[in-house]
Image: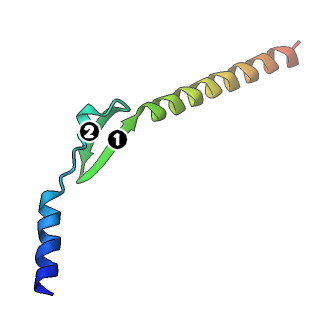
């Protein structure tokens, strides 16, 4: 049992994570707020842009509809 524990202990020390958030091309922005990590990715940016277009389109449709209704 002792040998098994030492084996796992050695493995855990030898395993290193090579991930670096600063080098990730999909991460546009990250910050730590109140011990929580917030990550803004390219996909988040795409989703936000889609939502902006939907919002603008909805305003345009409402505005166009009102113009036709008032005539």
Which of the two discs, 1 and 2, sits closer to the camera? Answer: 2
Q: Residues within 10 Å of mark 1 (few under 14, many from 20)?
A: some
Picture layout, residue 21 above or below residue 60: below
Colouring = rainbow
Residue shown at 81% from the left, 14% from the top: 67
Q: Nearer the viewer, residue 65 or 29?
A: 29
Q: Which residue is more in the foreground, 26 or 11?
A: 11
- What residue did someone put label 1 on? 39
Q: Is residue 11 left or right of residue 27?
A: left
Q: Could you say where residue 33 lies in the image, as x and y percent from the top left?
A: 25, 47
Judge from the rendering whether residue 43 lies leftward or rightward of residue 7; answer left or right. right
| Cα–Cα gap, marks 1 and 2 | 9 Å
Answer with the quarter of the image where residue 10 lies: bottom left
Q: Residue at x 38, y 32 (%)?
A: 26
Q: Residue at x 21, y 50 (%)?
A: 17
On screen, residue 37 versus residue 46, left or right, reads left
- Dot 1 or dot 2: first in sequence order is 2
- The picture places residue 66, in percent across and down from the top left corner, at 80, 20
For label 2, the residue is 21
Location of residue 24 (image quadrant):
top left
Q: Nearer the viewer, residue 47 or 10?
A: 10
Under circle 2, the secondary element is helix
Neighbor class of circle 2 (other Cα within 10 Å; few <14, some 14-19, many 20+) is: few
Residue 35 at x, y percent in the picture: 23, 54
Quadrant of the frame with the C terminus = top right
Q: Up-down: is 65 above or below 34?
A: above
Asked whether the residues under the numbered discs 1 and 2 touch, taking CB atoms below 8 Å apart as contact, a structural biologist would say: yes
Position of the N terminus, as image quadrant, is bottom left
For the image shown, how many numbered marks are present on the structure?
Answer: 2
User: What residue is rendered at 16% in x and 80% in y?
Assistant: 4
């Amino acid at each position: 049992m002792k040998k098994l524990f030492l084996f796992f202990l050695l493995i855990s020390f030898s395993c290193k994570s090579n991930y670096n958030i600063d080098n990730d091309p999909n991460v546009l922005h990250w910050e730590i707020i109140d011990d929580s990590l917030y990550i803004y990715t390219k996909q988040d940016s795409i989703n936000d842009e889609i939502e902006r277009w939907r919002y603008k389109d909805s305003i345009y449709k409402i505005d166009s509809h009102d113009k036709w209704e008032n005539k």
